[in-house]
Image: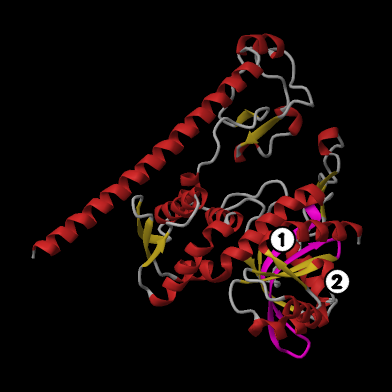
């Protein structure tokens, strides 16, 4: 009986020690965030002119064209002629409830924390920025908008500058572009998800895991196995480096905060980490392969900003469900399109043999050169098996460490095609 009481006391002390280490890690991150914000604030204040001097300079002058300012107009002001909204502000520089001017000359003082990303999981999707689009599952049956829309005044109305013909440019419909590209190859689009440029909370975990996979590989394998058994898993880190321990403990902490694992305990003295998985369809899909697709898509977006010249013509699609000319159904993991040319990527976190025939069949229709068609594997096969896989599929076999190089070359090929 005393032995059982002693074991419970030891377990309770280990949990307390683990919680104290978590608190210590959180305090360290808070201190780093405060130091970063202080530096940004001081830099911002030094770069900006005084408010009074700016008021005296601009009290009776309209904002110059090169000033980086955005007018946020309420629905009530949408029908007011543009010329009426561009009049100079009064000397007091006050704003009306219908229009608010936002200064974008600074990139902001506050960065988005990991906790904010996690909380955003419960919020509506954010609008895409830069190269981005809103992520959504789309149907090819949706009507295709016209590339331009001309708005003219009524024939009976007197002609004036405010009533002149205006051309409103509309971004091309990516679904229609994909559908037309596939139709040229005899393929029918059934369903597709459009990848946005702005990351969501799932993407944060995918990038963290992908960028540190060499350190997180043991944790990931145990986590993936535990989803099959539903039991807790433990990881001994006595032989691990300090960096690997730090990455593993931080990843487990963020997973727990986002409810992707139910709980975890780490004992510094024994360097033993124990975790209890949470099982749900979205978590299982993420762990068994969804994270790798997301990581590839995020990396491709970042590299595309360095290579793509026309952002509005570059699109990335996920989970493209197709019908082949012989009525068989198939699927592509990732496909990027730019001016009629494509980059095709498949990924596997486990056994790839079951997918070889599908990749081979798909490429007979897609006919994408191997410089822009890749298979990303976590566990690379031997030299002979790798050469045979590339010969059969017509695709390059790429490791996670070589993925950046492959995508950079593929984007250069895409621009030159």
Image depth: mark 2 or mark 1 in front? 1
Q: Residues within 10 Å of mark 1 (few under 14, many from 20)?
A: some
Is 205 or 94 nearer to us in this picture?
205
| Region in magenta | 312-340
Res 143 seen here: no
Residue underneath mark 2: 369
As measured in the structure, the alpha-carbon distance from the residue carrying label 2 to the one carrying label 1 is 17 Å
Instruction: Locate the N terminus and report the quarter of the image it occupies.
Output: bottom left
- Residue 352 position within the rendered picture, expressed as x and y whole percent measured from the top left: 64, 79
Tell which residue pokes out farthest to the left in this image: 1
Looking at the rendering, which quadrant does residue 264 occupy? bottom left
Question: Which residue is disc 1 drawn over?
Answer: 403
Mark toward the start of the polypeptide (2 vs 1): 2
- In the image, taking residue 405 as reference, residue 3 lies left or right, namely left
Q: Position of residue 85 (x, y in %)?
A: 70, 29
Main SS of the magenta part reads strand
Is 60 drawn above or below residue 372 in the view shown? above
Residue reaching furthest to the right? 416
Relative depth, front residue between 136 and 160? 136
Instruction: Tally the numbered discs.
Output: 2
Do residues under tags 2 and 1 come within 8 Å of each other at their CB atoms?
A: no
Q: Quadrant of the C terminus?
A: bottom right
């Amino acid at each position: 009986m005393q032995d059982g009481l002693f074991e419970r006391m030891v377990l309770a002390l280990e949990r307390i020690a683990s919680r104290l280490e978590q608190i210590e890690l959180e305090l360290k991150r808070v201190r780093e965030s405060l130091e970063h914000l202080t530096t940004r604030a001081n830099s911002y204040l030094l770069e900006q002119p005084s408010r009074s001097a700016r008021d005296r300079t601009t009290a009776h002058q309209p904002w110059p064209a090169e000033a980086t300012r955005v007018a946020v107009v309420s629905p009530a002001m949408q029908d007011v002629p543009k010329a009426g909204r561009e009049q100079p502000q009064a000397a007091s520089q006050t704003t009306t409830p219908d229009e608010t001017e936002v200064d974008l000359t600074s990139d902001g003082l506050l960065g988005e924390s990991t906790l904010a990303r996690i909380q955003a999981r419960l919020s509506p999707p954010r609008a895409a920025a830069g190269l981005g689009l809103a992520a959504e599952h789309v149907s090819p049956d949706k009507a295709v908008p016209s590339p331009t829309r001309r708005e003219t005044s009524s024939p009976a109305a007197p002609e004036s500058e405010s009533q002149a013909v205006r051309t409103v440019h509309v971004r091309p419909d990516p679904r229609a572009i994909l559908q037309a590209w596939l139709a040229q190859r005899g393929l029918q689009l059934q369903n597709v998800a459009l990848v946005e440029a702005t990351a969501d909370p799932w993407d944060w975990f995918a990038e963290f895991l992908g960028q540190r996979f060499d350190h997180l590989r043991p944790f990931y394998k145990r986590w993936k196995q535990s989803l099959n058994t539903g039991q807790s898993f433990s990881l001994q880190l006595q032989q691990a480096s300090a960096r690997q321990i730090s990455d593993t403990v931080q990843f487990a902490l963020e997973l727990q905060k986002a409810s992707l694992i139910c709980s975890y305990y780490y004992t510094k003295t024994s360097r033993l980490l124990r975790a209890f998985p949470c099982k749900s369809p979205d978590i299982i899909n993420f762990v068994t392969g969804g994270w790798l697709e997301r990581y590839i898509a995020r990396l491709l977006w970042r590299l595309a900003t360095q290579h793509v010249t026309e952002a509005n013509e570059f699109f990335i699609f996920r989970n493209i469900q197709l019908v082949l000319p012989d009525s068989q159904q198939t699927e592509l993991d990732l496909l990027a399109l730019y001016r009629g040319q494509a980059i095709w990527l498949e990924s596997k976190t486990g056994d790839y043999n079951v997918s070889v025939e599908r990749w081979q069949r798909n490429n007979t229709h897609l006919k994408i050169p191997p410089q822009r068609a890749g298979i990303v594997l976590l566990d690379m096969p031997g030299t002979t098996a790798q050469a045979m896989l590339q010969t059969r599929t017509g695709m390059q076999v790429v490791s996670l460490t070589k993925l950046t190089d492959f995508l950079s070359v593929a984007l250069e090929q895409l621009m030159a095609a």
